[in-house]
Amino acid sequence: MKVLIAALLFISFSLCCFGNDSLIVALRSMPNDTNKVWAYRTLAFDLMDADTDTAQFFATKGIELSRKLDFYPGIIKSLLVSGYVFETDNNFNAALKQHFQALEISNQIGDEAMTCSIYNIIGFAYYYQGDLANALTYFDKAEILCAEIGDQAAYGQALNNIGVIFKADGKYAEAAETYRKSIRVKELQQDSSGLANSWFNLAISESYLGNEAESISAFEIARNIYLQKGDSANVISVLVGYGQTFCHFDRYPEAIEVLSEALTYEKHISKPTLYLIVSYYAQALRFTGEYEEALRQLNRIYPDVKDSDRYVLLRMVELELASCYVNLKRFEEAIPHYDRMLAFTDTINNAEKRDVLQELQTQYQTKEKEATIALQQKDIEFQKRQKLFLSIAVILAAALLVFALFFALNKIKTNRVLDAQKKVIEGALQDKELLLREIHHRVKNNLQVVSSLLSLHSRNIEDAEAQDAMLESRNRVQAMALIHESLYSHDDLRNIQASTYIERLCSNIFNSYKIDPEKIALSTKIDQLKLDIDETVPLGLIINELITNAVKYAFKEDGGTIHIALNADNNVVTLSVADNGVGYAEGAKPGFGTRLINSFAKKLRAEWSVLNDAGTTVTIMFPSKEKSAHPQV
């Protein structure tokens, strides 16, 4: 198979180079007509993997010439290829700007088939950016419109794309079912390329469902279709898929074999594909103990991807770098990558949360404006009828009764319309609350996934210090997960009951370190305060660090007591964490936990102090928000 792939790549590369050179020469003598537009577009598409600057130059030329000619298909296609070039450069905001311009023109000229295609293109741009919510929105639009206009080929592609989102969101059963539906549609359409893509994606979903045999079988079907079509690039993609599946089933030597084969074609594959191959190759190397080689591979692509918008890929690369450094006991180098991994996780979640909220707010504002316009129109009609009534009343007294009856009936109708609109607005508000609960639920679930990943990694670490660091990181993630769990499980979606949260947080820490309550007792005196999420996250992480430090270092074999107090007075919240242990060593160098407390204290605009007398007492004071942190009567 390797010889066949190499031959296919050589032929396609040679034809591409010869064709492009000839086309560039021909451009000089071509008149400024639609054929020249298509020539510009073809050159931009063929060059975007090799030279993005030149590709963008030709795409821009195509856009400019199409506008001069009022050639709308050329404008759309040139804008789309310009967006593809921006995607290759990892500039997804610029890519989306071009795609949305193309969508606007497609809607203006009423080209529904093209609109379907652009919906799919925009969906993939959001997907590569890690914005699954918006990606699913546009794939859904493509599916609905394709079904309406009867475009079965595009409908099958839209189904495949929706399956991609389900897979990325961890809903592998739904993804597999969607891919099977897409396969049935594409078999009827005899769409071999689309059919191979759906089999390929089904194979990956089956691997995540634990169905190893079904996954390998689906890969074989996809590979055979690609080989029959002479599609060398996607044959390489199947190699990558094999590598992912072997990694998923812990068959790392086999993963190394197929991924190293894929890397031999590095000069002929796109940069995004290369980044994916290297990421999984490094993971397989790490699990076989080849930490230095894994680092070398990751550092080969890291300068290109670290500042990109590919947040899902970046999260994986940062996690692998951190894990390699931990296994090599280079903990100081691991910490920045671990922090960036958490930051990208938060970015992905916040992007989903922000876009869903923005969509909800837009829907609500639109309905509110429509209600206002309707009320204004009713008011104008009412005034006109009053004037007409007064004029006719002077002439015909009998008409007074008729128009009075008409006015009364119309008012009843108007009130019914207003009541219906009021119910619509109230329903929108209820939908907003439901979405907010779902967002907090998803964030909590994502943090639980991170916690589980840390737990899985810790099982492969033998160094006690590294295991302890992983446990502390898990506790920090759990501290944040508890906050989102508290928000979606109570009626108040903005504020958190401090006493309940702190008691659950302390209980989790004691359980994680298997603390005997008979040996180390916990005493709390917490006012009935409510804090918002911006206060609770840093406060919870500070408490996590202080309790962890007390449990680990404060007491000798005879144990002791930890006391937590939290109260608010004159818009100032005071936290006190004290123990009657051995106290801290004077002049000791601040550790990582102390640096975290300093960072979170700055976020709270807090002042904090440490008293070393008959144990250790840490006091933190910060200004409260007037509407969130206040005693409950």
Image (cartoon, rainbow, N blue to C red):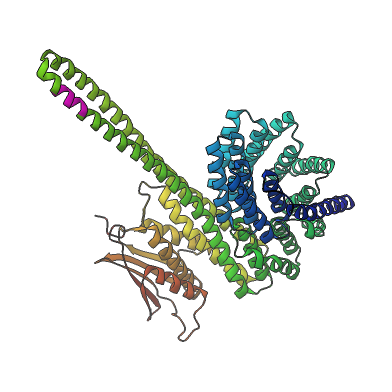
- Residue 75 placed where, x, y %? 60, 46
Magenta segment: 384-390
Q: Looking at this view, is 462 or 624 the one in front?
A: 624
Residue 555 visible in the picture: no
Image side of residue 399 versus residue 48, left or right:
left
Residue drawn at (17%, 26%) of the image: 386
Query: Magenta: predominant secondary structure element?
Result: helix
Judged from this view, the residue extending furthest toward the bottom is 587
Q: Looking at this view, is 80 or 185 the one in front?
A: 80
The answer to which image quadrant residue 213 occupies is: top right
Residue 254 visible in the picture: yes
Image side of residue 607 versus residue 181, left or right:
left
The answer to which image quadrant residue 326 occupies is: bottom right
Residue drawn at (48%, 71%) of the image: 596
Q: Looking at this view, is 391 or 442 the one in front?
A: 391
In which quadrant will I find the C terminus? bottom left
